[in-house]
Amino acid sequence: MSLSLVLACLWALAANMAAMIPARDNHWRRAFVLIGLGIPLLGYVTYENGPVIGLLVMMAGMSMLRWPVIYLGRWMRRRMEK
């Protein structure tokens, strides 16, 4: 397994551990940190393993951080309606 996939697995483990810890802000601060770390990691995974594996890792990340993706979709939909 390549280094990028090992790092992606560690990122997924960190995301799951962060979700288990109670938070007053509904985990948004942790989500922003995970997004900030995940985007460059996704580029590294795609660079080392190709676009198919990159898309699979992106889908896995989106399933863990689904609320930021949902809110982004809602925001984009509102912007398109104007």
Image: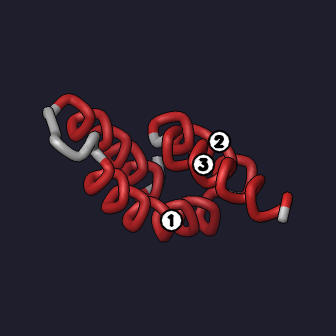
| 66 displayed left or right of 80 | left
Q: Amino acid at mark 3?
A: Met
* Label 1: how many Cα within 10 Å (few below 14, some 14–19, many 20+): few
* Label 3 Cα crowd, 10 Å radius (few <14 / some 14-19 / many 20+): many
**The quadrant where residue 59 appears:** top right
Q: Position of residue 21 (x, y in %)?
A: 14, 34
Label 2: how many Cα within 10 Å (few below 14, some 14–19, many 20+) = few
Residue 56 image label: 2
Q: Secondary structure at mark 2?
A: helix
Determine whether 69 is above or below 35 in the image: above
Asked if residue 56 lies left or right of residue 10, the reply is right
Residue marked by disc 1: 39
Q: Nearer the viewer, residue 18 or 10?
A: 18
Give me the C-alpha separation between circle 2 and circle 1: 14 Å
Q: Quadrant of residue 50?
A: bottom right
Where disc 1 sits, the SS reads helix
Identify whether 71 is placed above or below 51: above
Mark linked to residue 58: 3
- Return the disc, 2 or 1, that comes first in the chain's sequence: 1
User: Is there CB contact under 8 Å for labels 3 and 2?
Assistant: yes
Residue 31 image position (x, y, % from top left): 35, 52
- Residue pictured at 46% horizontal, 42% vertical: 65
- Identified at 16% across, 40% down, the residue is 23
- Count of number-bearing discs: 3
Figure quadrant of the C terminus: bottom right
